[in-house]
Image (cartoon, rainbow, N blue to C red):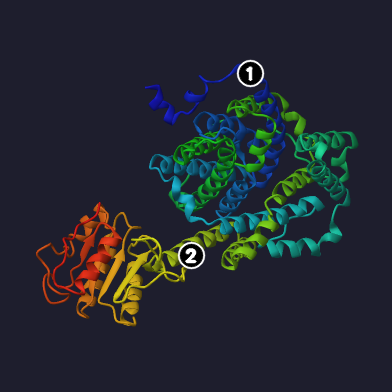
Amino acid sequence: MRGGLARFVPALSWVPRYQRSWLTRDAIAGFTIWGLLIPEGIAYASLAGLPPQAGLYTLLASLALYALFGTSKQLVVAGTSASAVLVYSAVTALHPSGAAAYSSLAAGMIILTGILFLCSGLFRLGFVTQFLSVPVMEGFVFGLAIFVMVGQLPKLFGLKKGPGDTIRQFVHLVAHLGSASWTTFAVGAVALVLLFTFDRVRRLRRVPGGLVVLAAGIVFSWALNLDAHGVDTVGKVPAGLPSLHGLDLSVHDLWVLLPSAAGMMLVIFSEALGAAQTFADKYGYQLDPNQDMIALGLANLGSGLLGGLAAGGSLSQSAVNDGAGAKSELSPVIAAALSLVTVLALTPLFTDLPEAVLAAMIIHAVSHLMKVAEMRRFYQLRRRDFWLGMITLLGVIVLDVLPGLLIGVILSILVLAFMASRPVFSLLGTHPTVPGGYEDIKRHDDAQPIPGIMIIRPDAPLFYANAQPLRDTVTELVNSADPPVHTLILDLDANDNLDITSSEAVEKLAGVLSGQHVRVALAHVHAPAGEMLSHFKPARDAQDTGAAGDAGVPGGWRAFPTLDSAVSWARGSSRTDDAPEAQVGG
């Protein structure tokens, strides 16, 4: 009973096995990620257009819920810059009438994302991220980082944000630099330098730089009364537990936000699964993507109900958790408990936090998403993949976040469809030294073609998108063969099964070639594929020994369990009318 329940609540597996010796390491890691997540949560709340406390409310739900229901031992689930921007972009498109309406729509979108996650996990759709290629995802994230950075620069200079897309906003910023508050810029610039210093100096890397900068910003703002010198501050942050939010969306709002929520789910899951897989490979354990979808769904559902941010798994946050020595999933639970203390008692400390410091923290966080070396690697390895990523990047900058994401998804699907529809096959010949061995003539110069027999092996499974192009290509090869071909052998070892369209394509190919007095044999026909083919044109039995095209079922084929048996039959049938028994392989 417990074993079955543990599949849906993985904590039932790791809690009974927890060792007391791990507690110290988990506590240290919990304090460390708390020190990282508090300033990040406040910064990402600003990025999402929500009040600072929303970032803290996220931690109350997301950290503990993923630890209880997720399958990664190191993944830290909290607010992320990508999800914050997606929430902001989707909600502002609805033009909410005020802060209350904005918060309600944001909560509704995050709850909707959680519901989509739960449904996808329950219906075992964890494979969906495979349809978003790595270059497209990296291009989208790179563009997102530029989008965020340009959007935060006005806060760094004490200016109002300009209208329009990223390029127009940057032009507006440059045009109004003469009106900048240089005191505000000095505060933000110092914060930015300190943050990068903590990154670059090896001895300081274990220090929670974000928490140090946040605390220093608060202290200096209070001591120097920066508010009176034109430096904007966060202001009062409410203390106490949050009130519950519901899915308060009209039908119109629901339909508008649904595609955005689906896109955000895809981005969050791609990022979280990539981070989780990194640590699963490092420590040698397996993930359950479908269960992780459920866990992320519960994390977002909980965060949305509390008025928090969209929650995802970040590689940088998880790396800090792992680097701090976390031994189990308890460290995020400890961080959640510390976040609760923060919400109840420590929020008044954030009143004097300068907005420029928050902007610096956001710019610092997203700068790690701008992977120039990775894009350069794509360019060197495969130009097409590089340009797919660049088109997605430009879509985010020129159009907006959600249109850019849509471009990335459409490009990924189009590339998948294009590649799947191209016939990929090998033209086989006999191996010169291995009896019964066959190899690709195009790749091996010593492979010997068999006169009068053409052996083609599809190197990818046949299905409705590539069946017709393969049929046309095979027909053209047979017609142009020199010397002429009397037998075509299709090696179907890559096909455990066939759909209706590909089975019809095989039937029509056999019919066309039969009219040209070319026999067709199928090798390595697995039982499910043979069962489907039997409904179209059954293989000739042992008594059907007529020559190609003049006896038996017109356009029929023979099925053989191995390629060698098909070749032996083809060689024999070219000399005599007596043919061995054909079998459908399993």
Residue 511 position (above or below residue 35): below
Residue extending farthest front: 433
Q: Could you say which is closer to the camera, residue 500 or residue 153?
A: 500
Q: Could you say which is closer to the camera, residue 581 or residue 76?
A: 581
Q: Amino acid at mark 1?
A: Ser
Q: Could you say which is closer to the camera, residue 495 or residue 133?
A: 495
Residue 351, how many percent across, how many down? Answer: 77, 34
Residue extending farthest top: 20
The residue lying at 20 percent from left, 79 percent from top is 517
Q: Mark 2 or 1, which is nearer the eye? A: 1
Which quarter of the picture shows residue 575? bottom left
Residue 568 position (above or below residue 263): below
Residue labelled with disc 2: 415
Q: How many marks?
A: 2
The residue lying at 18 percent from left, 72 percent from top is 555
Q: Amino acid at mark 2?
A: Val
Q: Quadrant of the N terminus?
A: top left
Residue 325 seen from this side: yes
Q: Position of 104 compared to 480: left or right?
A: right
Residue 174, how many percent across, how many down? Answer: 80, 63
Q: Which mark is residue 220?
A: none
Residue labelled with disc 1: 21
Q: Under tag 1, what secondary structure?
A: helix
Residue 145, how many percent across, how many down? Answer: 67, 54
Residue 412, how many percent across, how many down? Answer: 50, 61
Q: Under tag 2, what secondary structure?
A: helix
**Reading the chain from its start, which is encountered first: label 2 or label 1?**
1
Crowding at dot 1, Cα within 10 Å, few <14 / some 14-19 / many 20+, comes out as few
